Image: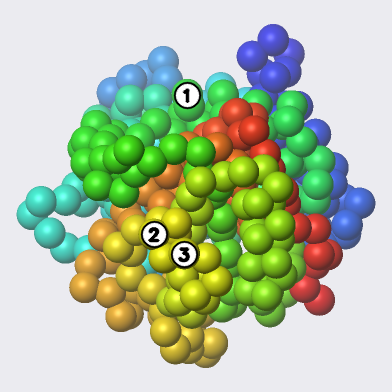
Amino acid sequence: MNIKKSFLWKIGIKICWEPYQKLRIFQAKYCIKDSIENFGDDFPDKTFYIIRRRPPGTGLLSNFHWVLNHIIYAILKGYIPVVDMQNYKTFYNEESVNLPKNAWEYYFEQPCGYSLEDIKKAKNVILGDLDKDVVVPAIQLPDPYFGKANISKYYKLVSKYCKINSKTKEQLEKKKKLLFENKSNILGVLHRGTDYKTAKYHLTPASLEQMIEKVMQVFQQEKFDYIFLCTEEQKAVDTFREVFAKEKVIVSDSERIKDYNDKDGITADIISKSFSAYKNGFDYLTDLIFLSQCDGIIASKVNGTLFALGLNNNKYRFSYLFDLGINS
């Protein structure tokens, strides 16, 4: 095994796999029998791996980590990954002449530069499993995954294979200027409630009361000047603005839930009430990117936290992650 594959093996298997064996939550298997399809005669010397998930997928970051895990698998096997959220639609797909047909390309570049259009007549194509996450999902990993060394490896993988596209970067810069101009020394706070409070096998998030108490303590002790609050709950925004001076709490214009419908789940609930599925995904993604650019972070261990920590690459001057066990 060469150095590149050895590096990916350690990230994708040792880090993402072994902790789950200890927890015995899932019995997913790494070994999958890949079947090669023939679509034409193009690229006879290459094997492409189509990353797909059974529609409609789930939340944006769950889909993201699903893709990342399959990218690791494809690279390990010597395949070229291509993400298909065009034929296998997600909650975030919407029909628009101004958007790509492939929802992955709303926000990200293709992992290795090849699109579905490029490989439509490729000689060697493998269709990734619709239901099996070849490397166990990052969301439910225990503490080792949040260690500094592992976060650094995560950063390298995401920076190389899941790059933000140019259109999204331009929009990010405009939004960032509106929110953070002349503001610095910011404590980022990620509060998740709704379905995360009860979803089985997910790490238990802090309650709003626990979050407020911790933020009050850290904000004073560490002498932060502002709080950037990332949350899907309007109640959390209202409470933070009551407890802290309103001008100290920075929030984006993302759509938030006032009355959560537990029946359908958070993603379906937000999208059903949203004017634009694309904008909903963009708002959530940009909130997390801005969270990664704060000076400190307080959060529960959820997908968004992992994403923010990974993009930050261990540059926070202060970080605190709630460790409250796993929902049964």
How far apart are the two marked residues, 2 and 1, measured between alpha carbons? 37 Å
Camera-side residue of 130 and 39: 130
Res 113 → quadrant: top left
Q: Is label 2 in a helix, a strand or a loop? A: helix
Q: Is label 1 in a helix, a strand or a loop? A: helix
Q: Can residue 319 be seen? A: yes
Residue type highlighted by circle 1: Lys
Residue type highlighted by circle 2: Glu
Query: Which residue does the image show at 65% across and 51% down from the upper left?
Result: 220
CB of mark 2 within 8 Å of CB of mark 1?
no
Query: Which residue does the image show at 57% across and 64% down from the upper left?
Result: 191
Query: Which residue does the image show at 23% across and 67% down from the upper left?
Result: 276
Q: Residue 169, image x and y in percent?
A: 28, 35
| Residue occupied by mark 1 | 160
| Residue lying furthest left | 97
CB of mark 2 within 8 Å of CB of mark 3?
yes
Q: Residue 122, image x and y in percent?
A: 32, 30
Q: Is label 3 in a helix, a strand or a loop? A: loop
For label 2, the crowd category at 10 Å Cα-Cα, with few meaning under 14, some 14 to 19 and many 20 or more, is few
Residue type highlighted by circle 3: Ala
- Depicted 55 relative to depicted 260: above or below: above
Q: Tell me the number on the disc at residue 247.
A: 2
How far apart are the two marked residues, 1 and 3, measured between alpha carbons? 40 Å
Res 301 → quadrant: bottom right
| Residue lying furthest top | 2
Camera-side residue of 316 and 6: 316
How far apart are the two marked residues, 2 and 3, measured between alpha carbons? 5 Å
In front of the other: label 1 or label 3? 3
